Image: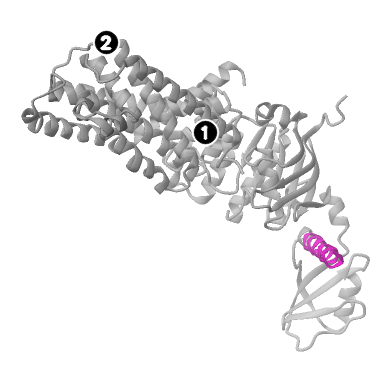
Amino acid sequence: MNSQQQWVAFSTIVRREIRRFMRIWPQTLVPPVITMALYFVIFGQLVGSRIGNMSSLPYIQFVAPGLIMMSVITNSYSNVVSSFFGSKFQSNIEELLVSPTPNWIILVGYIVGGMARGLGVGLIVTILSIYFADFSLHSVPVTIGIVFMTSLMFSLAGLINAIFASSFDDISIIPTFVLTPLIYLGGVFYSIELLTGFWKSLTLLNPILYMVNAFRYGMVGITDINIVGSFAMVGLFSMILFFVALWLLEKGSRLRS
Amino acid sequence: MNTHQNNALLIQGLAKTYDNSFQALKGIDLEVTEGDFFALLGPNGAGKSTTIGVICSLVRKTSGSLKIFGIDIDDDFSAAKQYVGVVPQEFNFNQFEKPIDILITQAGYYGIPASVATERAHKYLKLLGLWEKHNVPSRSLSGGMKRRLMIARALIHEPKLLVLDEPTAGVDIELRRSMWGFLEDINRQGTTIILTTHYLEEAERLCRNVAIIDKGKIVQNTSVKNLIKQLNKETFILDLKGEIENVPKLNGYPLTMVDSNTLEVAIDKNKSLNQLFDQLTALGVEIISMRNKTNRLEELFIDMVEKNLTADDEVSSNE
């Protein structure tokens, strides 16, 4: 395939992915918005007003960046895992596998599709958060950079999960038992300055902590951890996941017999 | 100079052993000439779908070589894939998508821009009688329509080699015949076609050359005409005008009674049918119609597969 044909194949995959999540918008776009609105009402307005300040910020302002990041992570991941596994389950992934589309285009196409949903939902939740809290964006490059890289990383993780999955149970195990606890314990709702000793050290092993803090820094200018370290860690993880996903596709693992 | 320049497909020593140690292909050789209408026949589990799987890259070969229009898949599978269109046995399109979107998306995977893809999608949907349904979710199509949609999808990048894995399975006879007509047309226009089927009448009617595969080995590879010539005996069903109580005894024609109105006779190729009728007429038995018990190719097919089974039994008993 020449580069022009590769571009057509790539844009076809991205268009198909966007069409898929737009077609089922009551399942893909509405639930995260409702969930986040409830978080804002309960943690921001009702409970948050009694908590007072967290890291010298009103609680709603502290928690909002974490909630936006949470929706980006879960939607990026779930879009790719459900779309790729769905294609595998219905065997229509074969349409792509028999075509001359190179594996790296298949990979990038699915990832961009996942990022489109993750960032789209993130944008909707950000607009929603403006209704509940006042923001003055502290650093546009940090905010945009970290949200893009986080979305990329979790889209890649979703694809790897989908390649290994052989049933619908397999695509819900990681989000339920790994992703959700990591998000909830990743500094979305509290500052790690509240923790001491073992629990603080344990929390520092959670990669989501770095993403949430970098994003919070970009939005409101406060962070519990080093921003450069956050970018380096997300970049490194994304690179590793990209090459693992590509290797699995090249090998045809669980896709070609 | 490449001696296989006119080969649409050239397979040499192709072997496939699955992870569970099942040896699906045991070193097969196959040549399909450009423009041919070729049948790949064999019983269930013989290796037909594995062969097709290797051609379209869904199955990774264990050893051997495969060239599509002279391009070795080990050198440039991506280029070879541009020449191949595949119609699989099972429905494998997204049932939630509309037929028009399925075709345009598939064209995109081959690098065909949307404007050209849309034009072609309209053409093939009309040619295959699906235009009326182009904008409905494909899950609402009938079984026959879904099969035609898969043919349209396989043709959207206008491949030079079309591989069909039992395309008419479960399709009613009227639709089957219209699909035959369509396939004959595209073959006449230059597309090489490889077909696997369980309907041997289909292979006899459509195909010029045939390979019979059994237990991962090619047991016969010749023209359909040559294959039919190998038929030593044909079995006919004779419908009688009146009823009979006993089987008539004829000289050189072993008859068996199916029921009081029907007789069955197996006739050697070198024997005349006239003598059979003369003897029956002399006994006062009147024939009103006559037909082959099974398709001629089917008789040969069963014979070859049985011979292969016997040969294998002999080998295993010697071991």
Residue type highlighted by circle 2: Ser
Residue B228 seen from this side: yes
SS of the residue under disc 1: helix
Residue type highlighted by circle 1: Leu
Q: Residues within 10 Å of mark 1 (few under 14, many from 20)?
A: many
- Measured from the top left, where is residue A232 in percent x and y? 40, 18
- Disc ID at residue A139: 2
SS of the residue under disc 2: loop
Q: Chain of mark 2?
A: A
Relative vertical location of residue A78 with respect to residue B293 in this rendering, above or below: above
Kindly identify the residue that appears in the image at 50 percent across and 30 percent down: B105
Contact between marks 1 and 2 (CB within 8 A): the answer is no
Q: Hey, which quadrant is residue B4 in on the image?
A: top right
Relative vertical location of residue B238 with respect to residue B316 in this rendering, above or below: below
Q: Nearer the viewer, residue B93 or A141?
A: A141
In the image, the segment drawn in magenta is: B299-319
SS majority, magenta: helix
Q: Nearer the viewer, residue A166 or A225?
A: A225
- Disc ID at residue B46: none
Task: Indicate left or right for B187 with B91 as reference.
Answer: right
Relative vertical location of residue B109 with respect to residue B163 in this rendering, above or below: above
- Disc ID at residue B103: 1
Quarter of the figure with the N terminus of chain A = top right
Q: Nearer the viewer, residue B236 or A53?
A: A53
- Measured from the top left, where is residue A74 in percent x and y? 32, 33
Task: Indicate left or right for A91 with A115 as reference.
Answer: right
Residues tagged by mark 1 and mark 2 found on one chain of the structure: no
Q: Hey, which quadrant is residue B267 in on the image?
A: bottom right
Q: Chain of mark 1?
A: B
Task: Indicate left or right for A37 with B197 as reference.
Answer: left
